[in-house]
Image (spheres, rainbow, N blue to C red):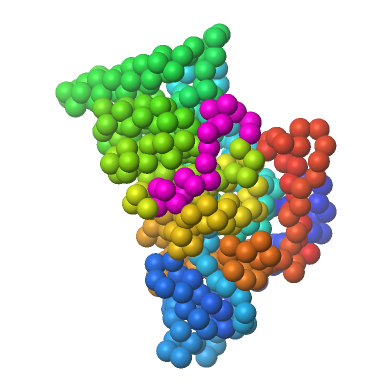
């Protein structure tokens, strides 16, 4: 990540030196010793060891049986807790945007083309232990565009490609598709549906159009059917290659999502789900995962008035794959551990809450082979905590991404400032500083 605007050329040059040194040091293994290690995919390990090399996890286990390479750089983590890098399944960092009011549905619009990889908001995520993000356009439209699955790597260039999980966004699916129902997309003018029923009808009509397009392409032997970027995105959804991330709050809106998903055979992630407690059995029967927002002050919109913090525990006990997200800037990225702690206080198990911050989210994004747990061969993304992950007194001390220390509390600062439109993520009122 680059420095915020206005930082000196000397500071930028220093960053380049640090990055070059970090790249060279990656050839040398790094061993974290003395910590309580929480792999998520296995029970916690007291006095554990994590060895990373070449950006991957090389070994995880108890100190008595896990050899440390002789040439390893030793990180003394005695008294600390190490967990996997957090996976935020719903975030708006990066200042990107999606479709506009020229239409209700924009499947062809890509957040890729508006995301700012040098935004200071990425500092905020690293300071909270977040290493993987589903960056999304907003929910003011029925379909606001394609999301991005990102790894927060530091880059001093404007190339968002440097952060992607896929290697070529022109030919590969590099994210999901953002849809919404309920209050947010409604309106009484322009290209806005006036009712919930009209919202569902418009979404159905577009999926029917995509099915017809698929049939025409299948019958086309001469190349006469022109490419349609809107339809191609929807075919990725219908073929199971692109996940729909569906903003929904009220119980009746959740049921509408389940109905449309069954009708067209796509797999959504139910996002937010304030009234999940009313439809737990229906969600469990669907087999669809849930990405929850956990709030301590659930004001702001009437459709979230019946929100309950107990949602996480209820869904967990029903067997629903459940993640917890920030919706940053709704919840500051630095406070994602706090959201999970509130879910624990309301009945979610500690194991389930940690999984909701890591492996469950990775599974929803189709990235569990890379991130979400501390397993040999996975990306070396990890967080060093000062203590219990769910204690109000615990702090993120270090965040490592692919074997590189990208945040260190003794060295770095991520801080918020007020002022006009301080609530607006696009104004970048959060700043990062490396010393």
In the picture, measured across the screen, residue 312 lies left or right of residue 266, that is: right
Residue 89: tell me if it is visible: no
| Residue 200 x %, y % | 38, 20
| Residue 283 x %, y % | 34, 40
Report the label total.
Answer: 0
| Residue 41 x %, y % | 39, 67
Q: Nearer the viewer, residue 344 or 200?
A: 344
Q: Is residue 394 inside the magenta stretch?
A: no
Residue in the picture at 56% in, 79% down? 35
| Residue 18 x %, y % | 69, 67
Q: Which residues are magenta?
A: 299-316
The answer to which image quadrant residue 20 occupies is bottom right
What is the quadrant of the C terminus in the image? bottom right
Residue in the picture at 75% in, 42% down? 429
Q: Is residue 312 inside the magenta stretch?
A: yes
The correct choice, above or below, for 423 with respect to 345 in the image is above
Residue 349: tell me if it is visible: yes
Q: Nearer the viewer, residue 330 or 2?
A: 330
The correct choice, above or below, for 58 with respect to 166 in the image is below
């Amino acid at each position: 990540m680059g420095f915020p605007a206005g930082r000196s050329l000397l500071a930028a040059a220093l960053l380049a030196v640090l990055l070059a040194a970090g790249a060279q040091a990656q050839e040398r293994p790094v061993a974290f010793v003395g910590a309580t290690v929480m792999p998520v995919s296995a029970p916690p390990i007291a006095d554990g060891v994590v060895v990373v090399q070449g950006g991957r996890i090389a070994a995880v286990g108890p100190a008595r049986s896990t050899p440390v390479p002789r040439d390893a750089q030793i990180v003394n983590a005695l008294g600390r807790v190490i967990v996997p890098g957090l996976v935020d399944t719903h975030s708006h960092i990066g200042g990107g945007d999606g479709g506009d009011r020229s239409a209700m549905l924009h499947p062809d619009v890509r957040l890729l083309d508006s995301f700012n990889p040098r935004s200071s908001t990425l500092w905020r995520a690293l300071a909270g232990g977040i290493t993987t993000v589903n960056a999304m356009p907003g929910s003011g439209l029925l379909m606001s565009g394609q999301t991005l699955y990102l790894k927060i790597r530091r880059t001093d260039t404007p190339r968002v490609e440097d952060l992607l999980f896929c290697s070529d966004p022109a030919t590969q699916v590099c994210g999901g598709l953002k849809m919404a129902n309920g209050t947010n997309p409604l309106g009484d003018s322009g290209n806005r549906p006036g009712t919930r029923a009209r919202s569902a009808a418009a979404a159905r009509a577009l999926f029917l159009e995509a099915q017809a397009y698929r049939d025409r392409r299948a019958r086309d032997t001469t190349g006469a059917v022109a490419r349609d970027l809107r339809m191609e995105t929807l075919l990725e959804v219908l073929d199971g290659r692109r996940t729909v991330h569906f903003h929904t709050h009220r119980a009746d809106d959740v049921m509408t999502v389940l109905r449309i998903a069954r009708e067209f055979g796509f797999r959504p992630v139910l996002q937010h789900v304030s009234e999940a407690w009313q439809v737990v059995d229906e969600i469990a029967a669907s087999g669809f995962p849930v990405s929850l927002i956990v709030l301590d002050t659930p004001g702001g919109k009437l459709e979230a008035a019946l929100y309950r913090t107990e949602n996480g525990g209820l869904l967990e006990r029903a067997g629903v794959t459940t993640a917890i997200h920030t919706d940053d800037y709704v919840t500051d990225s630095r406070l994602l551990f706090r959201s999970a702690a509130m879910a624990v206080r309301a009945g979610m198990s500690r194991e389930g809450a940690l999984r909701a911050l890591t492996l469950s989210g990775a599974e929803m994004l189709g990235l569990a082979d890379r991130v979400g747990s501390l397993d040999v061969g996975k990306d070396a993304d990890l967080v060093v905590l000062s203590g219990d992950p769910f204690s109000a007194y615990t702090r993120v001390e270090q965040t490592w991404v692919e074997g590189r220390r990208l945040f260190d509390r003794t060295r770095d600062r991520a801080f918020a400032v007020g002022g006009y439109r301080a609530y607006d993520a696009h104004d970048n009122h959060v700043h990062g500083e490396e010393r």
